[in-house]
């Protein structure tokens, strides 16, 4: 069973999201190792959302309330992030079962972002899965969920206008700044950071005609980044800030890089803070001549959705989620199908041995019996898929147990044991 805890810009403050973005990603290992319920965990923390995707052991759900998994997750993530568990529980929405897939597919497609259609989120979702693999916390169900999310987001991007250029956080920040910048080609721009957002920022600035670009890296990677993108590298942050007309921060630093101690008052400058946690100290906004555009400001000015494009994208997401749910339901009957086939082929092997004992060993009887078994199993296998997709899969499992006296879990364990042997 899939479970999702989500806190985003709709139901949580930026302060809470900021804390979660620091501590939550490292909590997945603890979730898996300390809970008998949780068999897999992927944590996604972006600039405007936090989400924990869990796979719950189906065999334990009947005896242990899913609320236990939610409570454990809230406690572990709250402790890792320095957030009071009660505050976190009040800020998260809990999704369980089929709605989890539709939610992640929409998130990965940019439909739940501050700016509908932003194109950074798909990469962030992909990296969350990679980090879970590295930490050993993913599971087969979560792998399938996230791979289908990636496929869905590609479909939305290629089939609708939702993911069109100009919808990202970076580009919206520059659009807001453009009302203050008469000519970008004359603006001196300082970029603080060398990660993915920094690369996107450089491309967006050049699209607007800016070419006087300098980069500073708190971690010392400015020179390499500048060489790759033909920029000027700065080693003195104070001097670089003094010389810039526009400052754009987008680092992964856990503490503010631009503070009142390094930025002086005087002439007019625009500071665009795209970092979460914040890269710019809030008090900077009170410095004479400084105008600060942060994520909160960008969210307030986010454009209205393009209704047709969004509607088309939602339809793609909904269809993909329905198919995912159908396939998940089919897979839930796999143990019953395995048990039935194991039972039938067990009887078949016994009959073949008796035939051989009677001297019928020319192979024709065995071939006929195996063909008959395949024919007999075809209809139940098809029927299992049909019942699963219609939501009546339990009827098939009950019928297998009632008609053949099969203990499905025990039969599957025996099959797996024989395969390992």
Image: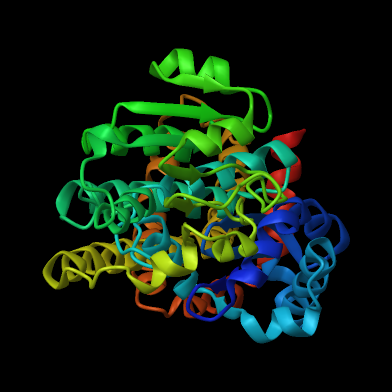
Q: Is residue 325 left or right of residue 178?
A: right
Q: Which quadrant of the structure image shows residue 17?
A: bottom right
Image location of residue 348, percent across then percent down? 55, 47
The answer to which of 103 and 395 lies nearer the viewer is: 103
Q: Residue at x 61, y 56 (%)?
A: 278
Image location of residue 260, percent across then percent down? 67, 53
Res. 99 visible in picture = yes
Q: Residue at x 40, y 36 (%)?
A: 189
The answer to which of 312 and 140 lies nearer the viewer is: 312
Q: Residue at x 53, y 53 (%)?
A: 341
Residue sitting at the far front: 266
Residue sitting at the far left: 308
Query: Relative to 368, is 171 above or below?
Result: below
* The C terminus, quarter of image: top right
Residue sitting at the far right: 34
Image location of residue 314, percent across then percent down? 25, 68
């Amino acid at each position: 069973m899939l479970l999702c805890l989500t806190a985003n810009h709709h139901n949580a403050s930026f302060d809470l999201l900021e804390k979660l973005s620091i501590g939550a990603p490292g909590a997945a290992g603890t979730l898996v190792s300390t809970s008998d319920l949780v068999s897999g965990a992927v944590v996604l923390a972006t600039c405007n959302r936090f989400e924990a995707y869990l796979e719950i052991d189906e065999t334990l759900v009947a005896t242990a309330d899913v609320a236990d998994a939610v409570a454990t997750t809230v406690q572990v993530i709250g402790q890792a992030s320095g957030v009071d568990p009660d505050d976190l529980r009040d800020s998260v929405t809990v999704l369980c079962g089929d709605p989890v897939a539709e939610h992640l597919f929409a998130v990965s497609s940019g439909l739940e972002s501050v700016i509908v259609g932003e194109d950074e989120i798909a990469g962030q979702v992909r990296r969350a899965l990679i980090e879970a693999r590295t930490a050993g916390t993913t599971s087969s169900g979560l792998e399938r969920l996230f791979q289908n999310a990636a496929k869905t987001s590609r479909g939305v991007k290629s089939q609708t206008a939702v993911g069109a250029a100009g919808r990202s956080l970076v580009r919206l920040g520059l659009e807001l700044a453009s009302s203050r910048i008469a000519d970008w080609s004359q603006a001196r721009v300082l970029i603080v950071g060398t990660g993915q957002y920094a690369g996107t920022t450089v491309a967006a600035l050049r699209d607007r005609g800016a070419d006087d670009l300098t980069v500073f890296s708190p971690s010392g990677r400015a020179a390499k980044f500048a060489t790759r993108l033909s920029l000027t590298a700065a080693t003195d942050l104070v001097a670089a800030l003094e010389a810039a007309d526009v400052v754009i921060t987008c680092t992964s630093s856990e503490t503010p890089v631009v503070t009142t101690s390094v930025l002086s008052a005087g002439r007019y400058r625009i500071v665009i803070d795209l970092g979460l946690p914040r890269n710019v100290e809030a008090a900077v906004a009170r410095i004479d001549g400084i105008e600060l555009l942060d994520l909160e400001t960008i969210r307030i000015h986010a454009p209205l959705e393009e209704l047709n494009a969004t509607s088309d994208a939602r339809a793609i997401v909904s269809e993909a989620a329905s198919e995912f749910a159908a396939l998940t339901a089919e897979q839930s009957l796999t143990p019953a199908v395995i048990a039935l086939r194991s039972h039938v082929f067990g009887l078949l092997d016994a009959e073949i041995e008796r035939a051989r004992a009677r001297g019928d060993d020319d192979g024709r009887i065995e071939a006929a019996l195996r063909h008959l078994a395949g024919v007999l199993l075809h209809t139940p296998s098809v029927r299992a898929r049909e019942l699963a997709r219609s939501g009546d899969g339990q009827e098939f499992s009950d019928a297998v147990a009632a008609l053949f006296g099969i203990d499905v879990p025990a039969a599957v364990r025996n099959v797996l044991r024989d395969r390992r042997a």
